[in-house]
Image: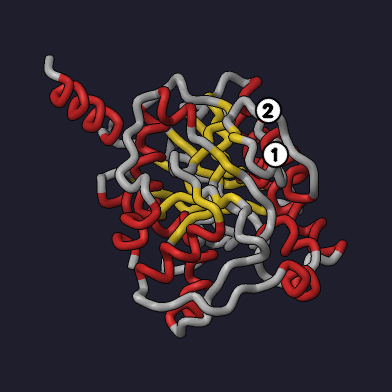
Amino acid sequence: MSSSQASMRRFFSSAASPAVMNILISGASGLVGRELTRSLGKQGHAITALSRDPSAPAFWDIERRAVTLPQQQNIDAVIHLAGENISIGSWTAERKERIRRSRVDGTRLLAEFFAAAARKPKVIIGASAVGYYGDRGNEELTEASAAGKGFLAEVAQDWEAALQPAAKAGIRTVNARFGIVLSPAGGALAKMLPPFKLGMGGMMGSGRQWMSWISLNELPSVIRHIFAHEELSGPVNLTSPFPVTNRDFTRILAKALCRPALLPAPRCLLEALFGDMAKELLLASAKVRPDKLLESGYIFREPELAAALRGLL
């Protein structure tokens, strides 16, 4: 077999879909949840959204620790994305506790529910984040790297640990450490676009902090790859293999929009406006590599930022 034939074979293997499945998604109304629901549903999978509405077919109440699913439905896979948005509002002590509980308590509820189920799903993919690694400067980070320090790192550690009851019950569990998910429909990129389109975007702080990102267009393929590859379990970084500094991100985004980037945001201003959120979301540096995805044969469709932004915008 030629090298080109081998490359194509790996690509189609990584992009192939497993058999049609019944998939339960929490957080299905969010940015990532909407895209996965659309894409996986289009491929023929049966998607059930886990809702807080008691009249919904699949209902959960974290406070009351209740989960109700259609009796006739067997769940093959769970994608657990639900959690309070961390980029809206000030990080008061009360809000930090809500952020932590929305992730940890909800994850533990689902893990314990499916651990006790007579028919268990084949896999549970639980959202986590590259915030697990904290602010690490230029250090190259993989799934084998130690946890960092700070609020987000502590939340991520507790978030991932909450999935352990399912793992101990023999369910394959994946802690999906999402990088910055890029989409003009929501998240960080959507907030950047208005000032950048006016030529008023700019670097944040020194611009030297590393940004680990992934295109929303890439995620359905990544999730299908995880479904199909049973060797993937535990932490899996969902990031492009080519992270960029904030300085380069600013330059590439401005070029994609054919606009200058004239107004940098000094660190002192960001910290004055956003406090701990600025330190951990905007100014923290995490240079993350998706080693497990690459080692399992996944071929990224949009690994380079410039091409990914062209596809998104």
Q: On residue 88, which mark appears?
A: none
Q: Specify whether residue 274 is in view.
A: yes
Compare residues 24 and 16 and report the one nearer the observer: 16
Q: Which residue is rendered at x = 49% and y = 58% of the image?
A: 248
Specify the amino acid type for callout 1. Answer: Arg
Which residue is farthest bottom? 198
Residue 258, above or below 294: below
Up-down: is 302 above or below 30?
Answer: above
**Does 232 sit left or right of 114 as displayed?**
left
Classify residue 309 by image quadrant: bottom left
What amino acid is found at the position of numbered circle 2 in the picture? Answer: Pro
- The residue at which mark 2 appears reads as 165
The reply to whether callout 1 and callout 2 are in contact (CB within 8 Å) is yes
Quick one: label 1 or label 2, which is nearer the N terminus? 1
Quarter holding the N terminus is top left
Numbered tag placed on residue 108 in the rendering = 1
Give the residue drawn at x 26%, y 45%. Answer: 44
Residue situated in front as seen by the camera: 58 or 89: 89
Residue at left offset 48%, top offset 60%:
249
Q: Position of residue 173 (x, y in %)?
A: 55, 29
Secondary-structure class at tag 2: helix
Residue 235, picture quadrant = top right
Residue 196 in the image: state x and y as whole percent.
47, 77
Q: Tell me the distance, in whole angstroms, between the alpha carbons under discs 1 and 2.
A: 8 Å
Residue 122 position within the rendered picture, expressed as x and y whole percent measured from the top left: 46, 27
Closest to the observer, 54 or 179: 179
Q: Is residue 137 left or right of residue 271?
A: left
**Image-based side of 86 in relation to 261, left or right:** right
